Image: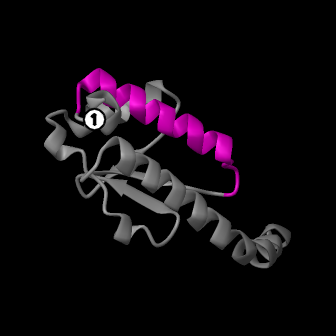
Amino acid sequence: MAAAGLIALGEGPKRLAEDHAIARRLAEGIAGILPAHIDLDAVQTNIVFVDVAATGHPLAAWQASLAAEGVLVTIVAGKIRMLTHADLTARDIDAALDAWRRVTAAFGAPSPASAR
């Protein structure tokens, strides 16, 4: 346990900037899919919140639909919460954004991509 802790202390801070950048990319991608449902200014760390309440679909339905697409999220304070971490890659973010597009389209939620 101590060895794992020492590695985390040594490597963790180096990863923070990358984790935060990945979270920013995820947030910006979701903002492009569901404008006005995410506060980009609030994305300062590796945590991304999406407020889907105004879409007319229950949070649990979003959570289940995203999970069916391979995107695991939690519900916190009435919003969808996602976390980025060392195991995520740019390809994972692309896959998550594709999942958000599919779920958004399935729910018929307004999206710039569907309006074109």
Rendered location of residue 25, percent (x, y): 53, 55
Rendered location of residue 100, percent (x, y): 41, 35
Q: Quadrant of the C terminus?
A: top left
Rendered location of residue 106, percent (x, y): 31, 21
Q: How is the image coloured?
A: one colour
The answer to whether residue 4 is above or below residue 32 is: below
The answer to whether residue 14 is above or below residue 29 is: below
Give me the residue at 74% from left, 74% from top.
14
- Bounds of the magenta span? 86-109
Residue at numbered disc 1: 60
Magenta part mainly helix, strand or loop?
helix
Give me the residue at 14% from left, 44% from top.
54
Picture quadrant of residue 114: top left
Give me the residue at 82% from left, 71% from top.
7
Q: Is residue 45 magenta?
A: no
Count how many numbered circles sit on residues in the image. Answer: 1
Amino acid type assigned to the residue bearing label 1 in the image: Ala
